Image (tube, helix red, strand yellow):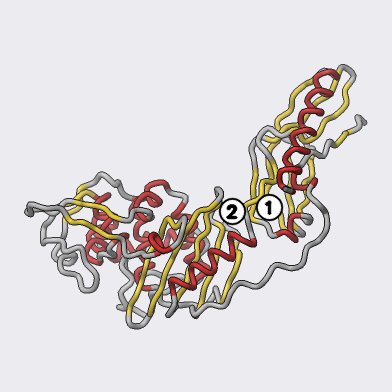
Amino acid sequence: MRKLVMVLIVSLLALPQLVQAAEPAPPPVSAETAVLIDVTSGRILAEKQGEKKMRIASLTKIMTAIVALEEGNSQDIVTTSDKAYAKEGSSIYLKRGEKMKMEDMLYGLMLRSGNDAAVAIAEHVGGSVEGFARLMNEKAEYLGMQSSHFTNPHGLDDSNNHYSTARDMAVLTAYALRNPEFRKIVSAEVKSIPWEGEKWERKLLNKNKMLRLYKGADGVKTGYTKLAKRCLASSASRNGQQLAVIVLNAPNDWDDSMSWLDYGFSNYPLTEIIKDKQRMGEEKQADGVLAYYSSRSFSYPLSEEEKSLVDVRLVRNINQPFLEITLGTSVLARIKLTMEQETMAQALSNRFTSNLESFIRTMLEGM
């Protein structure tokens, strides 16, 4: 049986192996429930009663927007029905019968929390509010939001059957933020949209003050009703990492969100574990070597303590060799490997180059 020679050139494993002290607990928050999530990986970084069922007010519109973007067409023309016209609560003051492009309706939905826009969008995409609610619940089921149920597209307190959890809303928010159109809408501080029959446009100022209060903030949605109290979904990006935080029934929602975002960026930075096309190992052959290279890069949010606990294992099977990346007993990723035939001279050169790159990265990370 041919001998498999592992060349461990994983930059993460070259980091100092001293186990650091446990990371501090997240700062206390006023919110009844809260969850902090890394958007790309979906990893929950902090949680306070995250699975408690709660009213979510206008955070509902995160689901409304992503369902509309995926099931509808942002260039469609939406007509304001009698039911959408003058809908109670926050509004963008749509006129009865007013026509507007779906994209502009979505800005009105997410920046000014227009309940009239929510109903108009729901009727256009789902045929009715009830039909759209079915689409919302189907999306929730698809995303594994097991403790959520939606009855309307706006979040007004019209039913005890309309609820979610901070954890479910974090999962939804991370999913929605991976959609480029959604990201563009929720990150806008100001947007002008048409106003049919008027000489001027509607100028929408985003209600989400986080965009002005917190460096790197790039979304997502405010919410308030008398029963739900203050709710907020926030996102921010720093050093290539995007985090999102959900706070429900939070008297100090802005401060809560900023302190947990600071905590996440400080204690769980995005750490590159595997580089794209990184040389991971080789198998000796009669006329040279068969070298293994990663097919993509992989990064993950890790505390200092966790960095020394990550394991990278090369797995050879008949169909396709792959890397298995684990943290303790949890599998973080499985990454396909490509195989290349190399002469001994090529192997020595590539091995030296890979080890040198790994050494340089380790030195830079330690500075």
Q: Quadrant of residue 269?
A: bottom right
- Tell me whether circle 1 and circle 2 mark residues in contact (CB < 8 Å): yes
Local crowd size for mark 1, using a 10 Å CA cut-off: few (<14), some (14–19), many (≥20): some
Q: Residue at x 27, y 63 (%)?
A: 112
Task: Give residue 325's position: percent from left, percent from top.
Answer: 73, 49
Residue of label 1: 332
Q: Position of residue 293 (x, y in %)?
A: 72, 32
Dividing the picture into quadrants, the one containing residue 266 is bottom right
Asked which secondary structure carries label 2, the reply is loop
Q: Quadrant of the N terminus?
A: top right
Q: Residue at x 80, y 23 (%)?
A: 349
Neighbour tally class for label 2: few under 14, some 14-19, many 20 plus, Cα within 10 Å: some
Q: Give the quadrant of residue 267.
A: bottom right
- What whole-number distance in Å separates the C-alpha atoms at marks 1 and 2? 9 Å
Percent across and percent down for residue 95 are 11, 61
- What's under tag 1, amino acid-wise? Leu
- Please determine whether, in this image, residue 235 is positioned above or below residue 253: above
Q: Which mark is residue 41?
A: 2
Please state if 22 lies on the left or on the right of 193 as rendered.
Answer: right
Q: Give the secondary structure at mark 1.
A: strand
